[in-house]
């Protein structure tokens, strides 16, 4: 491969990545312990940063790469934002067939892209059914997520208030597919 | 447009060597510091090429960004093992191709319905023919598009394409030839349609 042949190429060999991509990727690398990054929380205190990192790591564990959101962390514009943040916990779908997975993923991604286009979307992952439950008495296999109260995925985004967050949740294709979404505000720290 | 690999001029080789030297410094700094700044230095240098390849291979800006992210996750995890048997950019683009192939396999090899119809507005807005060309390339069948993008845009040789895609050189050449023909026909149709308006 010759990197310097731009003049002979059909199209330019470089395109500017989407705005904010670099920061989102840096945040993802930091959340996975691949780079160190000074964050707003870290500046607020080491203990707080450790808690935030643990929370982020917990959310990212078990993510299915194929449906990884484009934004694992705060968008560039949200770096200094103080807008309230909300997490949508998505229940498993009552009727979920593997054959329909690609179309479903595509539909959810379009929705996330639309929310992200409004500068609201921060992160999102689909979770595997498997996992471990950790407690003081030892570890055990995680039970399969319950369609009523289990969590099959999440989205994290910013909204003006709970009402707007609920409206965004209602627009998620998960609802029309029969899934339940629990909207929880992120506690300000 | 006969499918032969372009000749490599000595001056370009010198530029490549210089670029590799700079990359070695950046990678060394990244591995010793693993901080935000050292990541940004490498990212700024190569993200444009990795993103262009990812977006054009997948035909989707959204998939392109997903792939770009996956490339950096894998690169940051395995840079220590990189042996400089290729340039850093070639290595990164190779990861992008692998990620794209994995994505296709996960989706059952189905033709992807682009979830974002066009490349993002924030990309340098190409004028006239360039817009047509980007769209026509995106509309090509996967096999044609992969080989054409790798060869005609990113400068891979047929041998390299064969290794990356798991096909032989002859197949790469024939896919390129057919891809170019399809591209030319698509562009001619667009031109003719404009003329009728």
Image: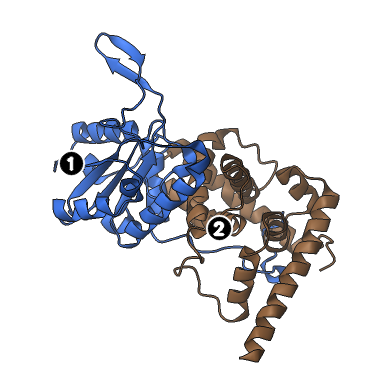
Chain colours: A blue, B brown
Circle 1 crowding by C-alpha within 10 Å: few under 14, some 14–19, many from 20: few
Residue under numbered circle 1 = A44
Residue A130 appears at what percent x and percent y?
Answer: 41, 24
Q: Which part of the image, by quadrant, shows the N terminus of chain B?
A: bottom right
Residue B68 appears at what percent x and percent y?
Answer: 51, 50
Q: Quadrant of residue B150?
A: bottom right
Residue drawn at 28 percent across, 46 percent down:
A156
Residue B125 appears at what percent x and percent y?
Answer: 51, 74
Residue drawn at 65 percent across, 49 percent down:
B90
Q: Is residue A73 visible?
A: no
- Front disc: 2 or 1: 2
Q: Which part of the image, by quadrant, shows the C terminus of chain B?
A: bottom right
Q: Quadrant of residue A48?
A: top left
* Mark 1 secondary-structure assignment: helix
Residue drawn at 35 percent across, 35 percent down:
A92
Q: Quadrant of residue B80?
A: top right
Residue drawn at 31 percent across, 28 percent down:
A146
Q: Is residue B52 left or right of residue B192?
A: left
CA distance separating discs 2 and 1? 38 Å
Residue under numbered circle 2 = B55
- State which chain disc 2 sits on: B
Q: Is residue B128 left or right of residue A112?
A: right
Circle 2 crowding by C-alpha within 10 Å: few under 14, some 14–19, many from 20: many
Q: Is residue A135 left or right of residue A126?
A: left
Q: Is residue A114 left or right of residue B144?
A: left
Residue at the extreme top of the image, as rendered? A137
Frontmost residue, B111 versus B99: B111
- State which chain disc 1 sits on: A
**A139 is higher (above) or lower (below) than A106:** above
**B141 is higher (above) or lower (below) than B122:** above
* Mark 2 secondary-structure assignment: helix
Residue B122 appears at what percent x and percent y?
Answer: 44, 68
């Amino acid at each position: 491969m010759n990197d310097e042949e731009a003049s002979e190429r059909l199209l330019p060999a470089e395109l500017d990545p989407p705005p904010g991509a670099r920061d989102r990727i840096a945040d993802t690398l930091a959340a996975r312990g691949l780079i160190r990054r000074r964050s707003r929380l870290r500046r607020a205190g080491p203990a707080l940063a450790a808690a935030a990192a643990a929370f982020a790591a917990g959310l990212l564990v078990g993510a299915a790469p194929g449906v990884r959101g484009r934004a694992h962390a705060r968008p560039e514009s949200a770096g200094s934002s103080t807008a309230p943040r909300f997490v949508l916990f998505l229940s498993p779908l009552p009727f979920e067939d593997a054959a329909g997975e690609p179309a479903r993923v595509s539909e959810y991604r379009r929705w996330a892209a639309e929310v992200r286009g409004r500068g609201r979307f921060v992160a999102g992952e689909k979770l595997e059914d498997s996992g471990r439950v950790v407690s003081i008495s030892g570890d055990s296999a995680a039970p399969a997520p319950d369609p009523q109260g289990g969590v099959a995925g999440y989205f994290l985004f910013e909204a003006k208030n709970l009402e707007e967050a609920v409206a965004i949740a209602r627009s998620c294709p998960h609802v029309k597919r029969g899934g339940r979404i629990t909207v929880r505000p992120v506690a300000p720290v | 447009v006969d499918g032969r690999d372009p000749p490599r001029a000595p001056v370009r080789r010198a530029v490549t060597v210089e670029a590799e030297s700079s990359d070695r410094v950046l990678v060394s700094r990244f591995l010793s510091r693993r901080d935000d700044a050292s990541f940004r230095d490498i990212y700024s240098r190569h993200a444009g090429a990795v993103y262009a390849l990812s977006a054009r291979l997948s035909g989707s800006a959204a998939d392109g960004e997903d792939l770009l992210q996956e490339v950096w996750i894998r690169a940051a995890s395995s840079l220590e093992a990189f042996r400089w048997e290729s340039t850093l950019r070639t290595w990164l683009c190779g990861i992008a191709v692998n990620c794209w192939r994995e994505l296709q396999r996960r989706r059952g090899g189905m033709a992807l319905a682009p979830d974002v119809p066009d490349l993002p507005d924030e990309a340098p807005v190409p004028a006239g023919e360039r817009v047509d060309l980007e769209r026509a390339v995106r509309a090509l069948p996967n096999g044609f598009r992969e080989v054409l993008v790798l060869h005609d845009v990113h400068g891979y040789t047929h041998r390299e394409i064969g290794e990356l895609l798991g096909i032989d050189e002859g197949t790469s050449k024939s896919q390129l030839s057919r891809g170019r023909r399809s591209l030319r026909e698509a562009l001619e149709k667009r031109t003719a349609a404009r003329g009728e308006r």
